[in-house]
Amino acid sequence: MQKFLSKTKEFLLDILFPKFCVNCGREGSYLCSDCFFLIDVSERQYCPFCYPPKIVLDGRTCSSCRRFKKLNGLYSAVPYNSFMIKKLIHQFKYSYIKELAKPLSNLIIIHLANLNKLSNFNDFVLIPVPLHKKKLKQRGFNQSEEIAKELAKTLRAPILNNVLLKTKQTSDQVDLKKEEREKNIKGAFFCQRPDLIFNRKILLVDDIFTTGSTMEESALTLKQAGAKEVWGTAVARG
């Protein structure tokens, strides 16, 4: 009965509020299969902090950067330089289309499959990069958490939603330069359950990785709380 009601609700919603591909406008879904397969998913990993990005064969932050950085490495599915990717993420975050979490997370899954690393996360926990409570209330959902929920289904790794908190209200990172981003995000996070992450491997989940300031500050907080390793994953890298 519950399944029948759910399908009926979906049917009615599709009639009242039809879905259109955000790229080509075709009716049926927010990202049609033809447009999805136009996206070129990366088959390589790069050091999170080198610019221009340096390929790293083992996936880890390069030996030069790891001397002063806490993030162990990064999985980023696509570059954030295509019109389609920018539009998808913008619609996801600012037009509040939560259903885009699935195709966006699928890009990460394909990236991991390209690297033959889909089975590498059995001993990891997923932690979405948190929003401040005021931003969460304004948006209604945390886009990183929605992506993490989809990833968990394939990676078979648990999600810890309320371990890492954002306690400092910050300016939007997108409007700031690299040095300003680092200052803006410094001290913004707090680990309220260190017992859940002590000596564990963590996969931090976010939608976009640009300078890495947010993930690096998150990794610092988690490692200070006792995490063994902290890796990042993002749909797109700027």
Image (tube, rainbow, N blue to C red):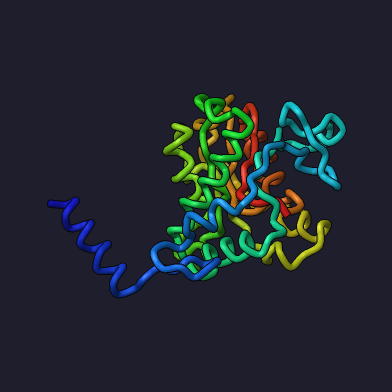
Vertical side of 128 occupied by 124: above or below:
above
In the figure, residue 49 lies in which quadrant?
top right
Q: Residue at x 49, y 52 (%)?
A: 103
Q: Position of residue 33 (x, y in %)?
A: 48, 54
Which residue does the image show at 64% across and 48% down from the upper left?
A: 40
Foreground residue, 180 or 198?
180
Residue 135 visible here:
no
* Percent coordinates x, y for residue 69 in the rendering: 78, 38
Position of residue 83 in the picture relative to residue 180 (left or right): left
Residue 134 in the image, given as x and y percentages of width and height: 52, 65
Which residue occupies the foreground of this view, 44 or 186? 44
Rendering coords of residue 71 (x, y %):
71, 37
| Residue 29 can be seen, yes or no | yes
Q: Is residue 54 above or below residue 17?
A: above
Horizontal side of 140 relative to 182 (left or right) equals left
Q: Is residue 24 above or below residue 218?
A: below
Identity of the residue drawn at 57% across and 33% down: 113
Residue positioned most to the left: 1
Taking depth in this image into account, of 66 and 29 the one nearest to the observer is 29
Residue extending furthest toward the front? 34
Quarter of image, res 86: bottom right
Q: Going 12% across and 51% down the picture, which residue do you hit? A: 1
